[in-house]
């Protein structure tokens, strides 16, 4: 049996993990930041590499016995460089937020001015939210999406950049569904001599598969998580121009972190290996086709999608014309076995804990092998659940339908 030692020794923990595994199998994951790693990545995470301490970098560790770890880290770096056409890669960041903290530490002093996207327009906490370290340590100024189009207005970005003259411009998004004009960001930054920082946490897999434009050759520094569309372990990497390699490495260690998590570094290497295959390119293409099919079906059923559609794996739906808010929508869908996340919409009149929209993504469903036909069906289930939110029997039937659909598309085990 699976996890036999754990079951014998600590049945309480084992039983919860079993239940979670069943939940993941039986339910539909539409949270835009989630995915299912391959069995090879999962195996790598449970290896003896977790036992090792290896503070420092390849050939320059503060602990002995790191020859194998050096080789692992080198593999991860070499593959990431190839995948993103990067000059320099640091594969040690523990997750997206710590990676961003290291980027700021490498390029800024406390109090420096940074320009980023407003959180309620699709930015991330680590891009200057006032309760986040980024907003407390640095002086963030923000741009918003164009209220008419729901898209980034590059003229507005330029206007604010010229007026505010930030030391760094951050282009990075957690809930933005359109292609980003990296080149234009770079031109604006060059006008004022600002650093360019792209946070591609959500779209890294789509960029690696060359389905979206790559900022790495254009920007000074780029961070990404490895666990979203890139479909790897929880973690992050930082890529930069060779001339910034030293300051970025020093910011990660010893600036921000202690020992790297070597089992995760190995899983990153396996992930980058997978992302270099033709199968991954097909996966990325299908992920986008699925999101577009889903957006079209929502629109056909009278839903409002911010910006009117999507170029990537996600969409934000404004539910204000459906007499429904994000929190309630999230709860109704949970009742039928579908996970989504509530989301603010640009200039949201409602508070962040109960915003006006939901964010939906197709990265995980596509990993299960679902295609456009299933996306249409899923939207039908969602719409029916919203329309019959008070009819318990109907919701039970929908939950059964979702479970049956998931049964036809099991999470890949090979
Ligand atoms: C998810 C995300 C992060 C944070 O990643 P964690 O691993 O959760 O810390 C940072 N930036 C963006 C744009 C994200 O979407």
Image (cartoon, rainbow, N blue to C red):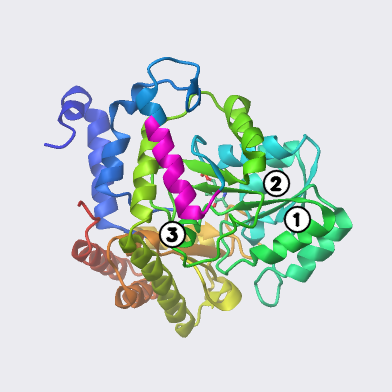
Upstream in sequence: badge 1 or badge 3? 1
Residue 208 within the segment the image draws in magenta: no
Q: Position of residue 226 (x, y in %)?
A: 45, 47
Quick one: quadrant of the N terminus?
A: top left
Is residue 81 in the magenta section?
Answer: yes
Q: Is residue 188 visible?
A: yes
Q: What span is in magenta?
A: 71-86
User: Which residue is more in the foreground, 29 or 210?
Assistant: 210
Q: Is mark 2 within 8 Å of ligand 1?
A: no
Q: Are marks 2 and 1 in contact (CB under 8 Å)?
A: yes
20 left or right, relative to 154? left
The quarter of the displayed image where residue 263 is located: top left
Ligand 1 under 8 Å from disc 3 Cβ: no
The numbered mark at residue 128 is 2
Q: Nearer the viewer, mark 3 or mark 2?
A: 2
Residue at (60, 74) in percent of width and height: 307
Q: CA distance from mark 1 to mark 3?
A: 27 Å
Q: Which residue is mark 3?
A: 340
Q: Position of residue 408 (x, y in %)?
A: 19, 65
Task: Please state the total of marks drawn on the protein image.
Answer: 3
- Residue drawn 56% across and 56% down? 174
At which x and y percent is residue 35? 37, 54
- The residues tagged by marks 2 and 1 sit, at their Cα atoms, a distance apart of 8 Å
Rendered image: mark on residue 279: none
Q: Secondary structure at mark 1?
A: strand
Q: Secondary structure at mark 3?
A: loop
Residue 348 visible, this angle: no
Please state the horizontal and vertical placement of residue 173, each as a whole percent of the image: 60, 57
Q: Residue at x 39, y 49 (%)?
A: 272
């Amino acid at each position: 049996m699976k996890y036999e030692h754990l079951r014998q020794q600590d049945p309480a923990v084992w039983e919860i993990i079993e239940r979670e595994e069943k939940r993941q199998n039986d339910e539909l994951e539409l949270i835009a930041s989630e995915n299912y790693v391959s069995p090879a990545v999962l195996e790598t995470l449970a290896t003896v590499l977790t036992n090792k301490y290896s503070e420092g970098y390849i050939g320059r560790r503060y602990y002995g016995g790191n020859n194998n770890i050096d080789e692992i880290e080198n593999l991860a770096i070499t593959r990431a460089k190839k995948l993103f056409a990067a000059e320099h890669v640091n594969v040690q960041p523990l997750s997206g937020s710590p990676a961003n903290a290291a980027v700021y530490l490498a390029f800024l002093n406390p109090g420096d001015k940074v320009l980023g996207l407003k959180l309620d327009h699709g930015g991330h906490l680590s891009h200057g939210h006032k309760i986040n370290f980024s907003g407390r340590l640095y002086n963030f100024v923000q741009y918003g999406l164009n209220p008419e189009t729901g898209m980034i207005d590059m003229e507005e970005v330029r206007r604010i950049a010229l007026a505010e003259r930030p030391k760094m411009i951050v282009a990075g998004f957690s809930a933005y569904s359109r292609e980003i004009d990296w080149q234009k960001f770079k031109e604006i930054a060059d006008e004022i001599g600002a650093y360019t920082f792209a946070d591609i946490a959500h779209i890294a897999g789509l960029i690696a598969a060359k389905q979206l434009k790559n900022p790495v050759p254009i920007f000074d520094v780029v961070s990404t998580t490895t666990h979203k569309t890139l479909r790897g372990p929880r973690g992050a990497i930082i890529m930069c121009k060779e001339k910034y390699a030293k300051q970025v490495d020093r910011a990660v260690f010893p600036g921000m972190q202690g020992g790297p998590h070597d089992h995760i570094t190995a899983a990153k290497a396996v992930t980058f290996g997978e992302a270099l295959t033709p199968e991954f390119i097909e996966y990325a293409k299908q992920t986008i086709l699925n999101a577009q099919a889903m957006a079209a079906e929502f629109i056909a059923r009278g839903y409002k999608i911010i910006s009117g559609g999507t170029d990537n794996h996600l969409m934000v739906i404004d539910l204000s014309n459906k007499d429904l808010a994000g929190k309630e929508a999230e709860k109704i869908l949970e009742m039928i076995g579908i996970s989504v996340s509530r989301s603010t919409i640009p200039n949201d009149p409602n508070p962040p804990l109960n915003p006006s929209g939901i964010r939906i993504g197709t990265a995980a469903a596509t990993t299960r092998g679902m295609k456009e036909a299933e996306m249409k069906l899923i939207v039908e289930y969602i719409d029916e659940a919203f329309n019959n939110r008070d009819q318990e029997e109907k919701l039970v039937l929908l939950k059964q339908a979702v479970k049956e659909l998931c049964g036809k598309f099991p999470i890949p085990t090979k």
